[in-house]
Image (cartoon, rainbow, N blue to C red):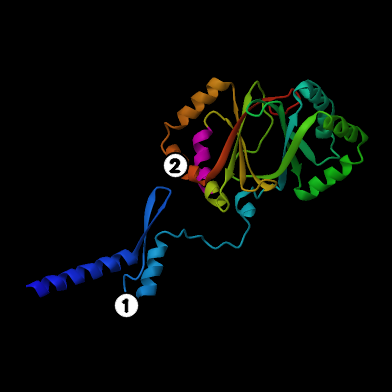
Amino acid sequence: MLSLRKMATRVLRSLGADLNQARTRVRARGQLVFVSRALSASTNRNGEDSWFKSLFVRKVDPRKDAHSNLLAKKETSNLYKIQFHNVKPECLDAYNKLCEEVLPSIHADKHYPCELVGTWNTWYGEQDQAVHLWRYEGGYPALTEVMSKLRQNKEFMEYRKERGKMLLSRRNQLLLEFSFWNEPVPRQGPNIYELRTYQLRPGTMIEWGNYWARAIGYRQKNEEAVGGFFSQIGNLYMVHHLWAYKDLQTRDDTRNAAWQQDGWDECVYYTVPLIQHMDSRIMIPLKISPLQ
């Protein structure tokens, strides 16, 4: 009897040691993942390991085309530029006046293959900031042509010189528009505009586009969707959604109403994990802005 107990004890201790050696627990974002080692000495071990890993490794479909070609509008070759100018607080009125004197002439001149989509001051968000959105009809060649011609435009070069005295900082991005969003077109006001900016995790732009291609249908009832863009040069994997509302209360009512539609909650659930950072600006259009 004693020898049997000793044998049983040795067997249990051996099993316990094997199990402890075979199992490592790793916690990642609240999920418990078990990585097994040496659970089997059979010839199928490599196949079993591959099957086990496949449960946790995300599969990526092979693609032979750039994301921009899959997501952007095919019927146009428009390129967009968004500019963010942080203005010295005491200079904002003078800056706005200067823009109102110069930018409409560029917008109206047919020799420049570009147009001003909208120009705003940030109301809520980063203060003393101006935001300009330009469209270049013809893509990168149009952008190059405009930049070359503007360097020969004495009025514009003087505008840049005076503008530089008023700025604390400035940055810009080149953008393409999502195929499933509306084309930004002039609209009457008065409106307030919200620019929602999302910094996505690298490699998730296609997923974002797939979900929003369906989700945009939930946000069209009040024609609040103005335009949707994704970056090509500047901060990459960045998305901008531009919305228009009559006022802040209308914005709140419209956004709350979206949650009453079946499917909107699913879109939010699946897109939030794709975001690294997000920001919202409420903007007021200048009187020269085509988007009022």
Left-right relation of 166 to 34: right
Q: Residue furthest bottom?
A: 43
Q: Residue at x 59, y 43 (%)?
A: 199
Q: Which of 186 and 106 is in front in this view?
A: 106
Span colored in magenta? 210-220
Q: Does the magenta stretch include residue 51?
A: no
- Marks 1 and 2, Cα distance to the nearest angstrom? 42 Å
Question: Element at badge 2?
Answer: helix
Q: Which quadrant holds the N terminus?
A: bottom left
Q: Residue 59, percent across and down?
A: 47, 60
Q: Does the magenta stretch include residue 216?
A: yes
Q: Residue 102, percent across and down?
A: 84, 29
Which label is found at residue 269?
2
| Earlier sequence position, callout 1 versus callout 2 | 1
Question: Element at badge 1?
Answer: loop
Q: Are marks 1 and 2 in contact (CB under 8 Å)?
A: no
Left-right relation of 37 to 123: left
Which label is found at residue 98?
none
* Image quadrant in which you'd find residue 167: top right
In this rendering, the answer to whether 35 lies above or below 185 is below
Q: Residue 7, percent across and down?
A: 15, 73
Which label is found at residue 42?
1
